[in-house]
Amino acid sequence: MAYNAPEGTADMLPAAARLWRSTVDSAAKLFGTYGYEPIYTPLFEITDVFTHGIGEATDVVGKEMFVVRSGENYKRALAEGDDSKLKSKQKLSLRPEGTAGVVRAVVQHNLVEQGAAPAKLFYAGPMFRAERPQKGRLRQFHQIGAECLGSTEPTADAEMIIMLMRFFEKMGVPMGKTRLLINSMGDDNCRPAYRESVRQFILDHEGEMCEECRRRADTNPLRAFDCKNEACAHVMENAPKITDHLCDDCREHYEQVKALLDAAGVKYIEDPTLVRGLDYYTRTVFEVQVVEGMGSQSAIGGGGRYDKLAEIEGGRPTPGLGFALGFERMVLALEAAGTLADSPKRVDGYIACVDPSVRATAFDLVCAARDAGLSVEMDHQGKSLKSQFKMADKLGVRVVIVLGPDELAQGKARVRNMSTHAERLVDIAAAKRLLAQFGGNLVGGGAAPVSIDALFDAEGAE
């Protein structure tokens, strides 16, 4: 039987893969101007990295994590009825988000030494959550994220938010069709009392709340602000707001972040109900939403400050903040706005063979062109010359180099411009010398030629 991809996953076919690669390249270039460097962590971690960091009461940990076991440990847990006898290091989970793993790596490798500059890191890759599959919500999805460890200043918060907005703008997401929501979650000095006030509010209105929100009253009352039930949302409109309960330090930090965003011309909306879904957030939180065309899956990125997470992961006190953006969600936003740019396959030229007698020479020329940094194709199926031209046209190449026995006897090749259909003869030996020259430049760290025309120019090749 023929198999399909698992439910909630999607094959990233060449066109989408090219877009993903160009998106990551754009992120690397932009984030690099802010001092961010790449980091790649494992696709799975010891489960405690997530349960301790994200929070056991969150939906991500409680409902959505994919558990990973080796064949032997799976059989052992199956035989014993549970996996309680497994060691902590044997209990693994696929990463549902990127922050906890990056912070674990920062702690493990001491990337933020005492008195050192902050560690600025960015990542890109797949994440996994066992959610109900729907448009914009997959079980394997892709994120690009950035983390800054070691800075307490509001300037770091503002820089992080500005960098995210600049990235969306660079990728073509219309700023007029997005909204940036910000809030402060407080810290250990003010949030516990606020959390208790929200819990009591839910209990006072439990008859009007759904079963899930009544459960959250004791486990994670702030998550009730995110409930999609209309009745719960209506009740929570009158719940206590964190901005009315911030301590002086948190309020001053929040005011400075807003002042910095104002000075940078970044528009935002204060949303006192914005809590994000993970327990590690403190103080600044933010989220970017698309205002139309995305339905309930309108959030395309967000993040916040997590000043306690490094300690939770076993390190010394190290303030931190970060964001993640969803690639698939961003693509949907670009499609909705009509600004999704194509990422065409790059093929500089095609070398066509009149008959099999010239195939070895064509192959040699193809290899030389590729060594010089050009993307060049040739026929590997024994097609007719007419079919080869059709293939070249389908690939969108500008130049086709035709090798025939008559021209080859003179050491020549025929070059056709596919736009104008103009042809010219070039000297193969001279062209190969130019190819070798460019190839040497590439090995020495030089740049690839700007186009195949530069290598098969009629005057330059003669």
Image (cartoon, helix red, strand yellow):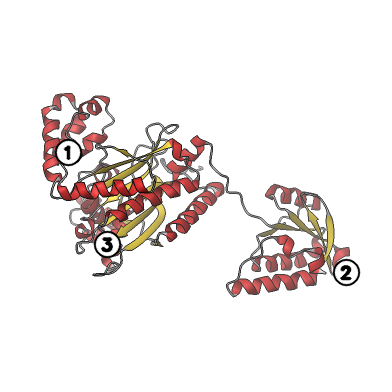
Question: Where residue 391 sits: x, y (%)?
Answer: 72, 50
Identity of the amino acid at label 1? Asp
From where the camera sits, is residue 131 visible? yes
Residue carrying label 1: 244
| Residue 150: mark | 3
Point out residue 314 in the picture as x, y percentages from the top left corner. 20, 62
Instruction: Residue 427: tell me if it is visible.
Output: no
* Numbered disc 1: secondary structure: helix
Tally the numbered discs.
3
Q: Which residue is mark 2?
A: 410
Q: Secondary structure at mark 3?
A: loop
Q: What's the amino acid at mark 2?
A: Gln
For disc 3, the neighbor class at 10 Å (few under 14, some 14 to 19, many from 20) is: many
Give the label, 3 or 1, closer to the camera: 1
Residue lying at 30% horizontally and 47% vertically, measured from the top left: 259
Q: CA distance from mark 2 to mark 3?
A: 68 Å
Instruction: Identify the image quadrant of residue 286.
Output: top left
Quarter of the rendering containing residue 429: bottom right
Q: Quadrant of the image for the C terminus?
A: bottom right
